[in-house]
Amino acid sequence: MDASRKKELKIFANSVRKNILKSTHAAKSGHPGGSLSAAEYFTFLYNGELRVDPKNPKCPDRDRFMLSKGHTAPGLYAALAQAGFFPEEDLLTLRHIGSHLQGHPNMNSTPGVDMTTGSLGQGISAAAGMAKGAKYLGKDINVYTLLGDGEVEEGQVWEAVMFAAHYKLDNLCITVDVNGLQIDGATKDVMNTDPLDVKFKGFGCDVISIDGNCFDDLEKAFARFHENKGTGIPTVILMKTVKGKDVSYMENQAGWHGKAPNDDELAKGLAELDALEEQLKKEA
């Protein structure tokens, strides 16, 4: 990836992080930690990976994205707003009565949301069904889904993966945000699912392990997904990330899984992200 493209993506991701803080602060609730860890992923999706049109979000031939870890909606909403699906000022209505931006994505009210999610395990199941439907109809539609590493403790996830392999859904790209933390603490302590790579391979998937906060790694991983088209093999990206990325007091802290910043914490977080943006703009 050339330097100018990478710089553009980094600045976009930084803005996603700012809007995650602003929206959860405005709501006085929400899930910033896992939204921040996936900012690069959301950024890459909505800057060319997904074949979608903000002006025609219901185009029947569009690619689909299912946020299986639906509680990280603040990250998805921030990326959708910056990509032009709805005004950025709407982000400050997160979780407010009457807002189209509720705590979990709602396909009936939010432009760009392809499936209502939140109950863990159901997003990947819907994604597998949509990928199968596209195959049945002979449509060139790619389906993407993002799971949390706590979410893969759900048995429904593995039923969906088994389904995807059985029906040779090479148009399905499954990504797991492996930030190591869930609401009750470290995933290895709550319910150790390691080794994830061995498990997904055992179910018949091609597995790629990457640094999920690195755009070069994301580019290579999605390139591998496209190379797998025609093989009948679903792709799984295991994305090692930092929960609460780039906000110092949130990084690697399970307590920020589902808690909003107060006024002082918002100011501190935005100051750090503003400083990072200034640094990014100075890079060649």
Image: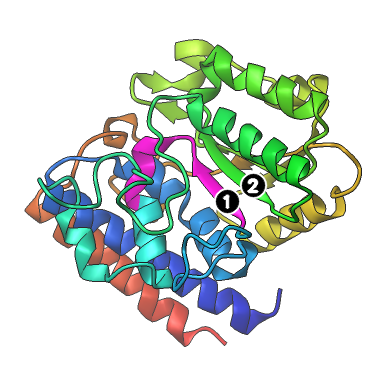
Left or right: 68, with 195 as reference point:
left
Q: Residue 220, located in which quarter of the rendered image?
A: bottom right
Q: Are marks 1 and 2 in contact (CB under 8 Å)?
A: yes
Q: Earlier in the sequence, mark 1 or mark 2?
A: 1
The magenta span reads 63-74
Asked if residue 244 can be seen in this view, the reply is no
Q: Which residue lies at the image location 42% right of the left edge and 78% below the top edge?
A: 279
Q: Nearer the viewer, residue 78 or 134?
A: 134
Where residue 184 appears, as percent x and y from the top left, is 34, 19
Determine whether 40 is above or below 196 in the image: below
Name the element at disc 1.
Answer: strand
Looking at this view, name the residue that lies furthest to the right: 231
Determine whether 190 is above or below 171 in the image: above
Q: Which amino acid does label 1 sit on?
A: Arg
Where residue 15 appears, as percent x and y from the top left, is 36, 68
Instruction: State yes or no: residue 147 in magenta.
Output: no
* Circle number at residue 64: 1
Q: Quadrant of the C terminus?
A: bottom right
Q: Which residue lies at the image location 45% right of the left edge and 65% below the top edge?
A: 13
Q: Report, in whole angstroms, how far the alpha carbon at label 1 lies from the one at label 2.
A: 5 Å
Q: Which residue is identified by label 2?
A: 143
